[in-house]
Amino acid sequence: MSKPPLNPNFKADVAESFKAQQAMALIRATLPVIEHGRVEVHMPWWEGVTQQNHFVHGGVVGMVADSTAGYAAMTVAPAGAAVLSVEYKINFTAPAVGQKIIGRGQVIKPGRRLIVSRADIFAVDDSNEKLCATMQQTIMVLPEGV
Amino acid sequence: MSKPPLNPNFKADVAESFKAQQAMALIRATLPVIEHGRVEVHMPWWEGVTQQNHFVHGGVVGMVADSTAGYAAMTVAPAGAAVLSVEYKINFTAPAVGQKIIGRGQVIKPGRRLIVSRADIFAVDDSNEKLCATMQQTIMVLPEGV
Amino acid sequence: MSKPPLNPNFKADVAESFKAQQAMALIRATLPVIEHGRVEVHMPWWEGVTQQNHFVHGGVVGMVADSTAGYAAMTVAPAGAAVLSVEYKINFTAPAVGQKIIGRGQVIKPGRRLIVSRADIFAVDDSNEKLCATMQQTIMVLPEGV
Amino acid sequence: MSKPPLNPNFKADVAESFKAQQAMALIRATLPVIEHGRVEVHMPWWEGVTQQNHFVHGGVVGMVADSTAGYAAMTVAPAGAAVLSVEYKINFTAPAVGQKIIGRGQVIKPGRRLIVSRADIFAVDDSNEKLCATMQQTIMVLPEGV
């Protein structure tokens, strides 16, 4: 993002919002990278998030992608605004197998009312990364909060 | 579905597959309805699956929808086949707030290679149901399993 | 739709908007059904809209679906509002081959800011109808017009 | 794409397939760039493809995107294979207004059975380009043709 952030305090606000989500703690996801227009969500592989083949469950990959793209959007929203997930679409491109999952999210089109963002999800084994899903998302901005 | 099931044992096979998914136990989801061409996934509201406003997290709603539409597809697949989620698209239509979440999935178009299915997710409070998300999904059938 | 229309003049307004779209004339599409919460778009098969196998081109099926779901949304919008297509997702379920194409659109979730709608596209041969595509769409309402 | 093309004759095959689509001629689209893993579709602005505000109709933008992402996929498919559009999802990010529309398509994930591709659609005015839509698509490969 070339323009200055609408919310100068976006890093702290995004971190606080993420921390308040029990569902992110449930799957052991963290948000180690928060920049203007992009974030990263990390999640270790562990038994609790798997499906019948011991891969990470597609729905959990979707959860990671939803948070990744959604928090990328929040970094470009005004202070005090709520960002709501309107919809998303995700393609699975490889089994999510590895030591951890990394979601990389970026804003494609910032807008006053709507933001379009994208998340690519990688399965990481040692230092090899493999794209396992890609998502396109629409976010609604409510300037006044929820 | 008007045609007879390709897999006469689909109920037991679907139930067993669901039970083998740790991620469904993690969010406390169950699969109480398994019919030819449609299933229901239920999940109680509980603190662990919430976001910052104590609604069910959108990503968890997505997980429920993914399983709902995916297992609906599995009911029409041949015995021994694997069904893989190719992609899905979900719209959120209301906050997922209530005592429980019910996902209702149905097959829109069964196919030999690909199945298109849909899931509607309802938030249930007392006996009132409110549509909180609707999803369209593409499933790939691997006749030989994974 | 159980509630009364927000725009009492919706039929005339929708018909007029459709008529002003050159692209609908280009593919020979018409809008013979306009009701509160649902519409139908019809298009005859003709050589100009085909792909290499003489089926209706998937992109044209998408155009019909976009108009079908979009005008369904316009029937529930306030008078004077503009309705813009935010995004859509379409699955193709059968080749679009037949004498004509019928799109049937309905509103899934009306909203003040956003409307979610759906379109099912059928290929019609004699009196047989076959589902050839299904679409889920998000529409933005701009109360003040464009 | 780093690997060599599965179809050494892909450029001629893609060009021929595009030329056989009446619907592409109808909207005056051309395919001036065909490379391994990516293509460009161009379409001039003209009255016939517009909606009521004289912008290019969203459905036509969708048609261009569908062809762009689909032909990108065809460049990585085996000789003689048919590539079918399974589904796509498109977000509109700006009005499609300008002298021409350029679709840039690339393969995200090539596969033996399924290919995931993406198209970005730009409205071009003088030499300024503006992203007006972005699309994610799933393509099915039928090795034996249709």
Image (cartoon, coloured by chain):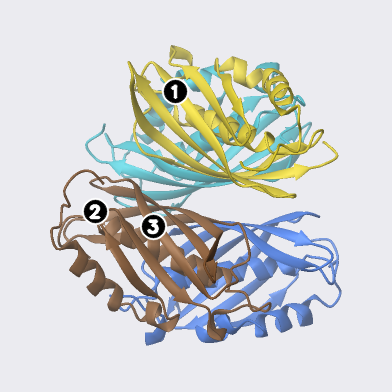
Chain colours: A cyan, B yellow, C brown, D blue
Q: Residues within 10 Å of mark 3 (few under 14, many from 20)?
A: many
Vertical relation: A68 (above or below) B32:
below
**Which chain hosts label 2?**
C
- Residue at 61 percent across and 37 percent down: it is B37
Picture quarter with the C terminus of chain D: bottom right
Towards the viewer: B33 or D49:
B33
Mark 1 → mark 3, Cα distance in angstroms = 27 Å
Q: CA distance from mark 3 to mark 2?
A: 12 Å
Residue A123 drawn at (x, y percent): 71, 35
State the mark number for residue B101.
1
Whether residue B67 is situated above or below residue C32 in the rendered picture: above
Q: Quadrant of the N terminus of chain D?
A: bottom right
Query: Which residue has dot 3 on it?
Result: C105
The residue closer to the viewer here, A98 or C100, is C100
Amino acid type shown at disc 2: Val
Residue type (three-letter) at the residue carrying disc 1:
Ile
Q: Chain of mark 3?
A: C
Kind of element beneath mark 3: strand
Kindly identify the residue that appears in the image at 25 percent across and 71 percent down. C15
Q: Residues within 10 Å of mark 1 (few under 14, many from 20)?
A: many
Please tell me how crowded label 2 is: few (under 14), some (14-19), or many (20+) other residues with Cα within 10 Å: many
Marks 1 and 2, how far apart in space? 28 Å
Res. D41 visible in picture:
yes
The structure residue drawn at horizontal position 68% and vertical position 68%, both measured from the top left corner, is: D72
Residue identified by numbered label 2: C76
